């Protein structure tokens, strides 16, 4: 349902140049289901790389952190990766508390369903944004906290905001706690663009569903046929940008605002930055962590960096 703070952000974004919309709004129930479908697409190699890496070294992560851990995942989606990770944790400790933090109630429901039958795992769900949820996630005495931030979710932040975010995550942790950060690495635009503009049109539906949500929850009157999905590679900032581009000049009403679109004008809905491994290690140093391990996937360049709170 409509949230006044979010409504304010939507209107500010639509009045800015270029026009933007909050990325987290992509994840209502249908958006979360469409994202799960994206992870199965042949063009979207990220999830398969992330899964290969979790399968390959989740046990090494747990050993490197040492001692019992409580696990918090930021934005777990349907919990597929958490299930694999928690199996590795289960080999090292009999009982694990897993806290899922996600803005999507549907994702949390699916995540809980996927994990609740696991022996020795207690699942807690916090419906909130990443930092708010991390701050609210109750500590488990006698454990180190291990935060998972997978799926290259960090890519959605501008680089400067990503560093500020890592500092904020660090501020919630104690020395010896850890963050496992999964990020997509640089690769040719010809390989990346289809991952965000697939032949079946699932990513286009995921992006355009944001307008369906604004119509339903914020009383907007976007005509879906007027907006096309577009994925762009921004070489300077090393990121994919998702846009919704007006096919013709049109006027949209939303709450008490009226927003005019010129033909060809876009609303920028998501950024997805690409990283370099040395840049990630520098981010650890600059945010109060030390990068103690880094693994990479060769088939789809992707990195898992294990940051230990100093
Ligand atoms: C790209 S999906 C990734 C899901 C999963 N981590 C994976 O790797 O497949 C992003 C997830 O983060 C959630 N999310 C997006 N922005 C968020 C925010 N600002 N705070 C909390 N959750 C957020 C979405 O609901 C979604 O479940």
Image: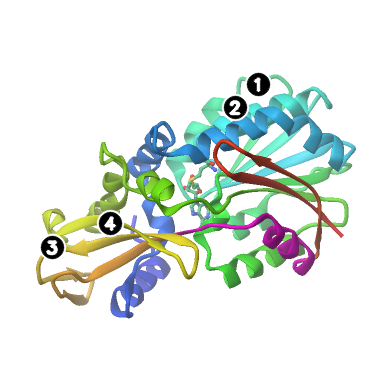
Closer-to-camera residue (71/1): 71
Categorize mark 1 by other alpha carbons within 10 Å: few (<14), some (14-19), many (20+). Answer: some
Using the numbered discs, state the Cα–Cα distance from disc 1 to disc 4 in whole angstroms. Answer: 40 Å
Looking at the rendering, the stretch of residues picked out in magenta corresponds to: 272-287
Question: What mark, if any, has residue 129 been given in the picture?
Answer: none
- Give the residue pinned by disc 4: 230
Q: Is residue 73 magenta?
A: no
* Circle 1: element type: loop
Q: Are marks 2 and 1 in contact (CB under 8 Å)?
A: yes
- Judging by the rendered image, the residue that carries numbered circle 2 is 115
Quarter of the image that includes the N terminus: bottom left
- Left or right: 271, with 267 as reference point: right
Residue 10, percent across and down? 34, 69
> In the figure, residue 93 lies in which quadrant?
top right
Q: Are marks 4 and 3 in contact (CB under 8 Å)?
A: no
Q: Determine crowd level at label 3: few under 14, some 14-19, many 20+ residues with C-alpha closer than 10 A.
A: some
Disc 2/disc 4 C-alpha distance (Å): 35 Å
Residue plotted at (85% across, 44% down): 141
Task: Provide the secondary structure element on which disc 4 rests.
Answer: strand
Whether 274 is among the magenta residues is yes
Look at mark 3 in the image and give the residue it sits on: 247
Q: Is mark 2 within 8 Å of ligand 1?
A: no
Query: What is the CA distance from the residue labelled 1 to the residue labelled 3?
Result: 49 Å
Give the quarter of the image for residue 133: bottom right
Residue matched to label 1: 118
């Amino acid at each position: 349902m409509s949230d006044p703070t979010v409504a304010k952000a939507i209107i500010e974004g639509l009045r800015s140049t270029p026009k933007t919309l909050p990325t987290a709004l992509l994840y209502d129930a249908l958006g979360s289901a469409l994202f799960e479908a994206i992870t199965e697409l042949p063009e979207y190699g990220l999830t398969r790389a992330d899964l290969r890496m979790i399968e390959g070294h989740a046990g090494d992560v747990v050993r490197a952190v040492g001692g019992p851990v409580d696990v918090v995942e930021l934005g777990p989606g349907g919990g597929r990766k958490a299930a694999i990770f928690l199996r590795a944790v289960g080999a090292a400790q009999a009982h694990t508390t897993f806290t899922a933090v996600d803005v999507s109630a549907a994702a949390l429901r699916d995540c809980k369903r996927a994990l609740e039958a696991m022996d020795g795992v207690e699942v807690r769900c916090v419906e909130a944004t990443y930092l708010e949820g991390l701050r609210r996630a109750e500590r488990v005495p006698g454990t180190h906290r291990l935060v998972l931030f997978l799926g290259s979710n960090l890519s959605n932040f501008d680089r400067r905001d990503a560093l500020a975010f890592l500092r904020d995550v660090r501020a919630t942790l104690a020395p010896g706690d850890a963050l496992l950060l999964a990020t997509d690495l640089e690769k040719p635009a010809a390989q990346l663009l289809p991952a965000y503009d697939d032949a079946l049109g699932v990513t286009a539906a995921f992006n355009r569903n944001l307008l369906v949500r604004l119509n339903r929850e914020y009383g907007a009157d976007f005509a879906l046929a007027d907006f096309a999905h577009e994925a762009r590679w921004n070489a300077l900032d090393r990121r994919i940008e998702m846009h919704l581009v007006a096919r013709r000049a049109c006027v949209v009403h939303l709450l008490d605002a009226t927003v005019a679109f010129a033909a060809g004008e876009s609303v920028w809905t998501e950024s997805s930055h690409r990283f370099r491994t040395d840049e990630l290690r520098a981010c650890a140093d600059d945010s109060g962590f030390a990068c103690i391990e880094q693994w990479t996937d060769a088939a789809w360049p992707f990195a898992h960096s294990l940051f230990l709170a100093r």
